[in-house]
Amino acid sequence: MSNILKIRNANDYGRYVGLKERHPSVCVVDYSKAESVRSSLNSYDVYAIFVLDHISVELAYGCGKYGFGGGTMVCVGPGQVGGKEDNGRAIEIKGWALLFDQNLLRDANISSGWPRTGLPQEPT
C-alpha cells in the first residue's frame, strides 16, 4: 500500500481522471467523459458517492476485496481508504461519482429537518 492517492479536496480525484475543476468544493465525474482512467488506492479527506454501472477490477475496502457489478453505489467519507493500487494500466469504469469537501457540511444544520422525517434527533 505504498502508492496511495491522497484526496484532500474533491478536485484531487477529478484531476487524477483528467477532468477540469468546475467548483472549488465539488467534483462530479462522468466516467464516459474522463480521460483514460487507471486504478488508484485512495485515502479520502472528502465525502464521495460512486454510482457504478460497471468496473473492470476488484476494489479493496477495509480488509476485503469486492467486485462491484451494475447498479452499485459506494459511499466513502473522510478517513477511509479504498480502491486498487495503480498498476499503470487503464481500467474500464462506467458510471458517475460525486465528491464534496467536508466544509460543505461543517456549518450545515442537517439535523434541523429530522423531526419531519421520523429519524432520531441529535441530543441538544
Image (tube, helix red, strand yellow):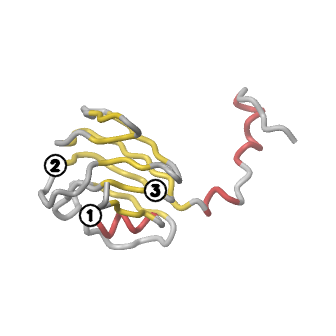
Q: Quadrant of residue 123?
A: top right
**Residue wearing tag 2:** 92
Alpha carbon separation for disc pair 2 and 1: 12 Å
Q: Residue at x 50, y 59 (%)?
A: 45
Q: Give the Cα distance between marks 3 and 2.
A: 22 Å
User: Which quarter shows the C terminus?
Assistant: top right
Q: How many C-alpha atoms fall within 10 Å of the one at disc 3: few (<14), some, or many (≥20)?
A: many
Whether residue 58 is situated above or below residue 9 in the rendered picture: above
Q: Residue furthest right?
A: 124
Q: Which residue is mark 1?
A: 17
Give the side of residue 60 with respect to residue 56, left or right.
Answer: right
Distance (Cα) linking label 1 and label 3:
16 Å
Q: Please tell me the numbered disc located at residue 48.
A: none
Disc 2 residue type? Glu
Q: Amino acid at mark 3?
A: Tyr
Q: Quadrant of the N terminus?
A: bottom left
Name the foreground residue: 121 vs 82: 82
Horizontal side of 85 relative to 119 (left or right) equals left
Q: Who's the residue at 29% across and 68% down the image?
A: 19
